[in-house]
Amino acid sequence: MKIFFWILVAVNVVFFAVMKSGMLDEAQEPAPLPLHAEQISLLNAAQTAHDAAEQPPSPLPASAPAAESACFEWGEFSGAEIDQVAQALQKLQLGDRLSRHDVGHTIGYWVYIPPLKDKAMVAQRVAQLKALGVSDYFVVQDAGIWMNAISLGLFKTHEAAQHFLDGLHTKGIRSAKIGEKAGNKPAVMFAMNNLNKETSDKLSVLQKDFSDIELKRVTCH
């Protein structure tokens, strides 16, 4: 009977020890932290904004550069040249970008040796010109302030006259000068506005058929 009593006590002790150990394990295990869904959403939104700020901005598409426009004046033309140039310009199909203006009468330029004292001096100067290789000249014989002057060439632009004069200087002819010479024919100036490079190049090709007439690039208005 005593043995049975002590066995029962031992069983109770062991059972009590096991129960106590399980309760301690449960007490030592930390309770899970509560989840707050609203805070998770806010953190995700903040992270998204931060990530977006970290990304470099997308490059904007490069815009094509504006095509350069050019404007020209071409002239002066007179006589049959007016219609010839007008027909040539029709090939460019400029429409209202082409206009023509009457500029009164032609103004040309001549290279000349000023009037000499008498015919003997004229003959002497002509001989000098021939010796220097100049055979194209004209002696003014009409009465007036230009009598006994020697004309060496007529030009439509000052640039052309200057180029010719420079050539005379290289030959040793220093007394020649450039002067304006008015004509008696109506003159026309052509204006071309807002031409692109392709059309400008075509215009330059046309100008070669009238190389003694100045084609001048001007400011577009």
Image (tube, rainbow, N blue to C red):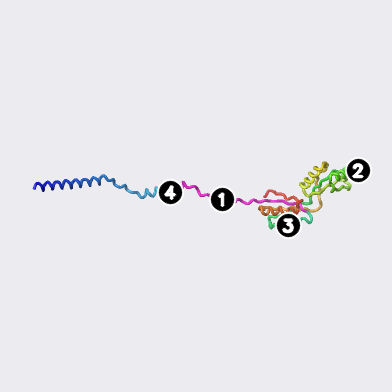
Tell me the residue that label 4 is attached to: 48
Tell me, for residue 120, which label it has, or none: 2
Q: CA gap, disc 4 to disc 1?
A: 29 Å
Tell me the residue that label 1 is attached to: 62
Give, as a single range, the part of the protein colored magenta.
51-77
Is residue 103 rendered magenta in the image? no
Which of pointers 2 and 4 indicates the residue nearer the eye? 2
Q: Position of residue 102 (x, y in %)?
A: 75, 53
Q: Nearer the viewer, residue 1 or 101?
A: 1
Looking at the image, residue 71 sits to the left or right of residue 150; the answer is left
Residue type pointed to by label 3: Ala
Sequence-first tag of 1 and 3: 1
Is residue 57 rendered magenta in the image? yes
Q: Position of residue 37 (x, y in %)?
A: 36, 50
Tell me the residue that label 3 is attached to: 88
Q: Are marks 2 and 4 in contact (CB under 8 Å)?
A: no
Q: Secondary structure at mark 1?
A: loop
Residue type pointed to by label 2: Ala
Sequence-first tag of 1 and 2: 1
Sequence-first tag of 2 and 3: 3
Q: Are marks 1 and 3 in contact (CB under 8 Å)?
A: no
